[in-house]
Amino acid sequence: QGRRERPRRARGDPGAMSESQITKRTVYVGGLAEQVDKKVLEAAFLPFGDLRSVEIPVDMKSGAHRGFGFIEFMEVEDAEDAIDNMHHAELYGRTLRVNLARAANNKPSTESNRPIWADDFFYRKKLQDEGLGVDDEALDA
């Protein structure tokens, strides 16, 4: 196997660059059978290149995995090869869905932080339900 040239890092904000690089070399694997664990998933994807990490999120209540996992490869090209070869492949009788993982968006949007009554519709409905109304003329003044 020939040595691959690593992509050069852009100067500037290394955090932003590394995050996009991580998402480009991390694949989402959906449709996992119950029997699949980290070792099985690792063995299935190792032929495509060196793996940095294998994660299978577990449901806290049941203790069983949730039917999907993430594999981070060392190289972007290896992740692309894994997607090309493993998407719609079968593992333990289940058809896998293998795609580039999307970045986790842990930042709540401004909409999700708003209480329900901050929306004018719900506020007006609540007032109506209580037999009150909104003085529209006073609001416009």
Image (cartoon, rainbow, N blue to C red):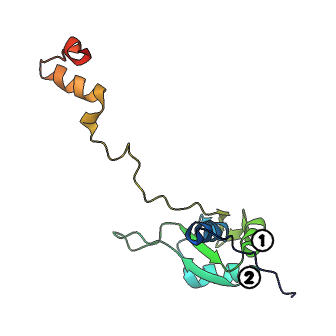
Rendered position, 134 above or below 33: above
The quarter of the displayed image where residue 124 is located: top left
Name the residue that disc number 2 marks: 49
Mark 1: which secondary structure? Answer: helix
Q: Going 68% across and 79% down the picture, which residue do you hit?
A: 44
Q: Amino acid at mark 1?
A: Asp
Tell me if residue 129 comes above or below residue 119 in the rendering: above
Residue occupying image coordinates x 39% and y 53%: 108
Contact between marks 2 and 1 (CB within 8 A): the answer is: yes
Q: Nearer the viewer, residue 19 or 56?
A: 19
Q: Is residue 34 left or right of residue 135?
A: right
Quadrant occupied by the N terminus: bottom right
- The image quarter containing residue 102 is bottom right
Name the residue carrying label 1. Answer: 81
Amino acid type, mark 2 = Gly
Please give left or right for residue 127 compared with residue 47 in the image: left
Q: Residue at x 58, y 85 (%)?
A: 39
Give the SS element for disc 2: loop
* Sequence-first disc among 2 and 1: 2
Residue 100 pos. (x, y %)? 66, 63
Name the spot of residue 81 as percent of width and height, x first.
78, 71
Residue furthest toward the right? 2
State left or right for residue 102 relative to residue 119. right
Quadrant containing the C terminus in the rendered view: top left
Q: Residues within 10 Å of mark 1 (few under 14, many from 20)?
A: some
